[in-house]
Amino acid sequence: MKNKLKNILGTFILSMVAGLAGAYFYVQVLEQNGISGINSYSDKPIPVNYTSGNAERLPVHNAALTSIGDGSLPDFTKAAELTVHAVVHVKTIQANQFNNNMFGNPFDFWGRPIPQKPQEGAGSGVIISENGYIVTNNHVVSQAESISVTLNDNRTFQAKVIGTDPSTDLALLKIEEKNLPFITYGNSDQVNVGEWVLAVGNPFNLTSTVTAGIVSAKARNIGILPDQYKIESFIQTDAAVNPGNSGGALVNTRGELIGINSAIASTTGSYTGYSFAIPVNLVRKVTEDLAEFGNVQRGFIGVSIRDLDSKLAAEKGINEVKGIYVAGLTPGGAAEKAGLKEGDVITQIGIFPVNSSPQLQEQIGRYRPGDKVDVTVLRNGAARTFPVVLRNKDGETSLSKAEPSLNLLGGTFENIASTDKNKLGLEGGVKISKLGNGKLRSAGIKEGFIITSIDKKQIWNKEDLENALKTKQGGVLIEGIYPNGVRAYYGFGI
């Protein structure tokens, strides 16, 4: 037994000596080759490949990101410094939320709405002007009763909703302050796949957080927006984005705003590698509309479309798989009036080539009703260009400014349909088709409510509603009926 232990111990000691000798020899060899230490890195920077735009668009090299192939690493400190002070923490209180009772009815025995405790929400926002305009996501503020904004220097302000657009998931807020830091607009058309980007926001209430990644794809449609007229043409990145980043900034290495972070693709609710931002060129148009009109002036081309693939091309006898196939035309719509036909393949909007439905929707979404847009199509193999005058969803070229009184109510209104008239025995009324921030939500009114009178005065249509509220001050009594036949009335102050 003793001999066996001696043999084991001897073997162990011999191994230790051999190992130390080998390590000493390895260090000597490395030092002779100019490398100091086993775990040291070479003084020469590791080369990184990235796409930062071509020389025509970037004639002057950015100090933060040098040209491809010179072996330099990207430096994001300047971009972070330029943007972190202009990204704010948005906090919301969702008061007057309502539950259904055990029978699925939102009212108690006496017809009163059943309330629940107020809920708090949080997101991010981007200051886009020195006088306090802030862009964020519609889903961050859509259910909010009150909104507060905390700046990077910890000052807090109450924010007012100027307008929202569910079709792009954007909202415009305003705080009363001057000389604020703001982010300058970039150009999302010049963003390239592979380009370095930063996401700036407040994930998990961790304020002023900056993450980096690259642009993974453009014009992504992920089917997240429920709006009938949605525009989904997201910039996809692998910059880490989590709950709380919504409404925050996606910026390039020059610190320019190129997108508003909106969504992540995840089965867990947290970041798993993909995030999506609304392109800034679309953001800019929507926010300008909201600031000027209180709503978005959306132009429509008046076509139903299909992405062109090999199967569809073979079926329709199309030689080249490029562009978007026109499957139908809106009668009397902009495209039909301009001369487009079913079977045309749209290849270009203005000067921009389009090869997918999201690209087409994004480009058209930048225009207003009445704008003239050149649409290039392939017809029987030949390219033709048609000047198309865009129209609104009602088929008109005029612009419509939101009435301040209706904007204050925070709803989207439509005249009652004949089916509802017959079903409920009504001669007129105005239905609340969508409900956002404002007096109606605060009073406990739910979507679908049909307003039949205000202060005991009959409301037949939207014009009556506008006139009743145009000069109204003080208390307001609204009466009406829900589609299920439940009558209700609500009071609030203006």
Image: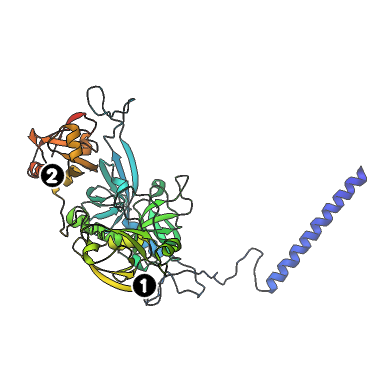
Q: x, y (%) of residue 64?
A: 42, 69
Q: Nearer the viewer, residue 218 or 179?
A: 218
Disc 1 versus disc 2: distance between alpha carbons?
Answer: 48 Å
Does residue 181 appear anywhere in the picture? no
Q: Is residue 50 above or below residue 155?
A: below
Q: x, y (%) of residue 477?
A: 12, 33
Q: Amino acid at mark 2?
A: Lys
Q: Secondary structure at mark 1?
A: loop
Q: Quadrant of residue 200?
A: bottom left
Q: Is residue 95 above or below residue 41?
A: above
Q: Amino acid at mark 1?
A: Gly
Q: Quadrant of the C terminus?
A: top left
Does residue 256 appear anywhere in the picture? yes
| Residue under numbered circle 2 | 462
Q: Is residue 29 above or below residue 421?
A: below
Which mark, residue 381?
A: 1
Q: Secondary structure at mark 2?
A: helix
